[in-house]
């Protein structure tokens, strides 16, 4: 298991629930949503291929994230991030590696299916720097 530091910036449009359940006024609305965050977490990796300093791995992890604004729009500044994907990396020092990968991620503040918890599911390319100790 590795400790991970995550830096993220995301932007786009989000369809979310608006209104109040109690007033029978729930409806969908689409809004712009952007945020930049930092997180600390843990991740597991499983080697798939290795050749010299190069490795291909399956990766999964979780991070507690803090954003510069309520993100996704209508949510909170704190969130949990779950991610899984593939990573290709290369050693650049004794215990340090730099890599690029593809991953699926889910971001949510964990408050359930309510308007104040607009979860985000995303796929994309990412860059990473890892050090084991």
Image (tube, rainbow, N blue to C red):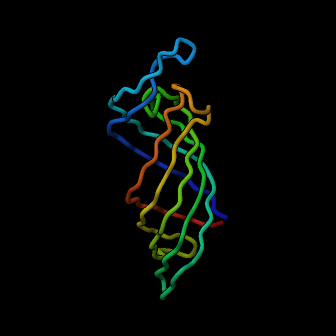
Indicate the position of residue 54 as horizontal and vertical percent values. 46, 81
> Which of the 4 quarters of the picture holds residue 99?
bottom left
Above or below: residue 26 compared with residue 129: above
Quadrant containing the N terminus is bottom right
Q: Which residue lies furthest to the front in this view?
A: 24
Above or below: residue 24 compared with residue 100: above
Quadrant containing the C terminus is bottom right
- Please name the residue shown 38% across and 60% down the image: 125
Above or below: residue 45 compared with residue 30: below
Looking at this view, is 82 or 127 the one in front? 82
Indicate the position of residue 58 as horizontal and vertical percent values. 54, 70
Looking at this view, is 121 or 45 the one in front? 121
Q: Residue furthest top?
A: 23
Q: Residue furthest bottom?
A: 51
- Please name the residue shown 45% across and 60% down the image: 103
Is residue 102 found left or right of 65 in the rendered image? Answer: left
């Amino acid at each position: 298991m590795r400790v991970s530091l995550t830096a993220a910036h995301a932007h786009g449009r989000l369809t979310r629930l608006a209104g109040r359940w109690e007033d029978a006024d729930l409806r969908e609305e689409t809004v712009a949503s952007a945020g930049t965050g930092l997180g600390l977490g843990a991740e597991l990796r499983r080697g798939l291929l290795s050749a010299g300093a190069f490795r291909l791995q399956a990766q999964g992890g979780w991070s507690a994230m803090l954003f510069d604004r309520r993100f996704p729009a209508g949510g909170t500044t704190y969130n949990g991030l779950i991610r899984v994907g593939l990573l290709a990396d290369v050693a650049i020092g004794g215990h340090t590696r730099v890599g690029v990968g593809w991953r699926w991620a889910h971001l949510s503040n964990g408050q359930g299916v309510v308007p104040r918890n607009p979860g985000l599911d995303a796929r994309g390319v990412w860059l990473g720097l890892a050090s084991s100790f």
